[in-house]
Image (spheres, rainbow, N blue to C red):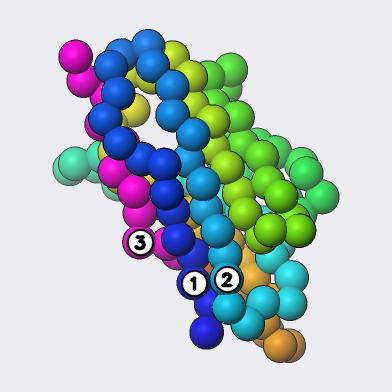
Amino acid sequence: QVQLVESGGGSVQPGGSLRLSCAASGSISIVNTMSWYRQAPGKERELVAAMTRGGSANYADSEKGRFTISRDNAKNTAYLQMYSLKPEDTAVYYCNADILTGWRVLNYWGPGTQVTVSS
Protein backbone atom coordinates (compact mmCIF):
# COMPACT_ATOMS: atom_id res chain seq x y z
CA GLN A 1 0.00 0.00 0.00
CA VAL A 2 1.30 3.44 -0.95
CA GLN A 3 0.13 6.77 0.42
CA LEU A 4 0.79 10.37 -0.51
CA VAL A 5 0.12 12.93 2.16
CA GLU A 6 0.24 16.67 1.61
CA SER A 7 0.83 19.25 4.32
CA GLY A 8 1.54 22.95 4.66
CA GLY A 9 -1.66 24.42 3.29
CA GLY A 10 -3.51 27.20 5.02
CA SER A 11 -4.70 30.77 4.75
CA VAL A 12 -2.41 33.60 3.72
CA GLN A 13 -2.77 37.20 2.65
CA PRO A 14 -2.04 38.27 -0.93
CA GLY A 15 1.69 38.59 -1.45
CA GLY A 16 2.42 35.97 1.17
CA SER A 17 4.23 32.65 0.91
CA LEU A 18 3.53 29.04 1.71
CA ARG A 19 5.52 25.84 1.44
CA LEU A 20 3.69 22.63 0.70
CA SER A 21 5.11 19.19 1.35
CA CYS A 22 4.15 15.82 -0.08
CA ALA A 23 5.46 12.66 1.53
CA ALA A 24 5.15 9.26 -0.09
CA SER A 25 5.16 6.20 2.13
CA GLY A 26 4.46 2.49 1.97
CA SER A 27 5.71 -0.27 -0.29
CA ILE A 28 7.88 1.94 -2.49
CA SER A 29 10.75 0.87 -4.66
CA ILE A 30 11.30 4.13 -6.54
CA VAL A 31 9.36 7.39 -6.72
CA ASN A 32 9.58 8.69 -10.26
CA THR A 33 8.00 11.98 -11.33
CA MET A 34 6.32 13.95 -8.53
CA SER A 35 3.87 16.67 -9.45
CA TRP A 36 1.65 19.30 -7.91
CA TYR A 37 -1.82 19.98 -9.26
CA ARG A 38 -4.49 22.33 -8.04
CA GLN A 39 -8.23 22.59 -8.41
CA ALA A 40 -10.12 25.78 -7.74
CA PRO A 41 -13.89 25.76 -7.11
CA GLY A 42 -15.78 25.24 -10.35
CA LYS A 43 -12.61 24.63 -12.34
CA GLU A 44 -10.78 21.61 -13.64
CA ARG A 45 -7.70 20.25 -11.95
CA GLU A 46 -4.57 21.73 -13.50
CA LEU A 47 -0.86 21.00 -13.39
CA VAL A 48 1.17 23.46 -11.33
CA ALA A 49 4.65 21.94 -11.43
CA ALA A 50 6.39 18.61 -11.88
CA MET A 51 9.84 17.26 -11.19
CA THR A 52 11.50 14.07 -12.37
CA ARG A 53 13.55 11.93 -10.07
CA GLY A 54 16.64 13.39 -11.68
CA GLY A 55 15.58 16.92 -10.82
CA SER A 56 14.25 18.20 -14.12
CA ALA A 57 11.36 20.59 -13.44
CA ASN A 58 8.60 22.10 -15.49
CA TYR A 59 5.98 24.64 -14.51
CA ALA A 60 2.68 25.98 -15.71
CA ASP A 61 3.27 29.34 -17.35
CA SER A 62 1.25 31.25 -14.76
CA GLU A 63 3.46 29.97 -11.93
CA LYS A 64 6.87 30.46 -13.47
CA GLY A 65 8.95 32.66 -11.24
CA ARG A 66 6.56 32.47 -8.29
CA PHE A 67 6.54 28.77 -7.48
CA THR A 68 9.47 26.43 -7.02
CA ILE A 69 9.23 22.66 -6.91
CA SER A 70 11.92 20.59 -5.24
CA ARG A 71 12.27 17.10 -3.84
CA ASP A 72 14.28 14.99 -1.47
CA ASN A 73 14.62 11.52 -2.99
CA ALA A 74 15.97 10.05 0.24
CA LYS A 75 12.76 11.09 2.00
CA ASN A 76 10.41 10.40 -0.94
CA THR A 77 9.16 13.93 -0.43
CA ALA A 78 8.36 16.79 -2.78
CA TYR A 79 7.94 20.43 -1.91
CA LEU A 80 6.22 23.38 -3.51
CA GLN A 81 7.46 26.78 -2.39
CA MET A 82 4.97 29.46 -3.34
CA TYR A 83 5.76 33.16 -3.28
CA SER A 84 3.76 36.29 -4.10
CA LEU A 85 0.51 34.45 -3.70
CA LYS A 86 -2.58 35.86 -5.35
CA PRO A 87 -6.27 35.29 -4.61
CA GLU A 88 -6.49 33.30 -7.84
CA ASP A 89 -4.03 30.80 -6.37
CA THR A 90 -6.78 29.74 -3.96
CA ALA A 91 -7.43 26.05 -4.57
CA VAL A 92 -6.99 22.57 -3.23
CA TYR A 93 -3.44 21.50 -4.03
CA TYR A 94 -2.86 17.84 -4.80
CA CYS A 95 0.31 15.82 -4.94
CA ASN A 96 0.69 13.21 -7.67
CA ALA A 97 3.44 10.67 -8.17
CA ASP A 98 4.44 7.78 -10.37
CA ILE A 99 5.73 5.10 -8.03
CA LEU A 100 7.39 1.79 -8.71
CA THR A 101 6.01 -0.75 -6.29
CA GLY A 102 7.32 -4.23 -6.77
CA TRP A 103 7.32 -4.60 -10.54
CA ARG A 104 4.64 -2.07 -11.52
CA VAL A 105 4.64 1.71 -11.89
CA LEU A 106 1.38 3.10 -10.59
CA ASN A 107 0.07 6.63 -10.34
CA TYR A 108 -1.04 7.93 -6.97
CA TRP A 109 -2.84 11.02 -5.68
CA GLY A 110 -2.81 12.59 -2.27
CA PRO A 111 -6.03 13.77 -0.60
CA GLY A 112 -5.14 17.43 -1.14
CA THR A 113 -4.44 20.44 1.03
CA GLN A 114 -6.39 23.69 0.93
CA VAL A 115 -4.62 26.96 0.12
CA THR A 116 -6.63 30.13 0.60
CA VAL A 117 -5.27 33.52 -0.40
CA SER A 118 -7.42 36.32 0.90
CA SER A 119 -7.17 39.67 2.62
The residue at the point 26 percent across, 30 percent down is 11
Q: Is residue 115 magenta?
A: yes
Residue bearing mark 2: 25
Local crowd size for mark 3, using a 10 Å CA cut-off: few (<14), some (14–19), many (≥20): some
Q: Quadrant of residue 10?
A: top left
Against 14, residue 116 (above or below) is below
Q: From the top left corner, tell me how far across and down residue 3 is, in percent.
A: 49, 72
Q: Is residue 96 magenta?
A: no
Name the element at disc 2.
Answer: strand
Hey, which quadrant is residue 57 in on the image? top right
Along the polypeptide, which appears first: circle 3 or circle 2?
A: 2
**Can residue 77 be seen at all in this image of the molecule?**
yes
Observer-side mark, 3 or 2, equals: 2
Q: Which residue is mark 1?
A: 3
The Cα atoms of the two marked residues, 3 and 2, are separated by 14 Å
**Circle on res. 71:** none
Q: Nearer the viewer, residue 22 or 59?
A: 22
Three-letter amino acid code of the residue under disc 1: Gln
Q: Please tell me whether mark 3 sits on a helix, a strand or a loop.
A: loop
Q: In the image, is residue 119 above or below residue 70? A: above
Q: Which residues are magenta?
A: 109-119
Q: Residues within 10 Å of mark 2 (few under 14, many from 20)?
A: some
Circle 3 residue: 111
Q: Earlier in the sequence, mark 1 or mark 2?
A: 1
Q: Check if mark 1's residue and mark 2's residue have beta carbons within 8 Å.
A: yes
Residue 98 in percent (x, y) is at 62, 66
- What amino acid is found at the position of numbered circle 2 in the picture? Ser
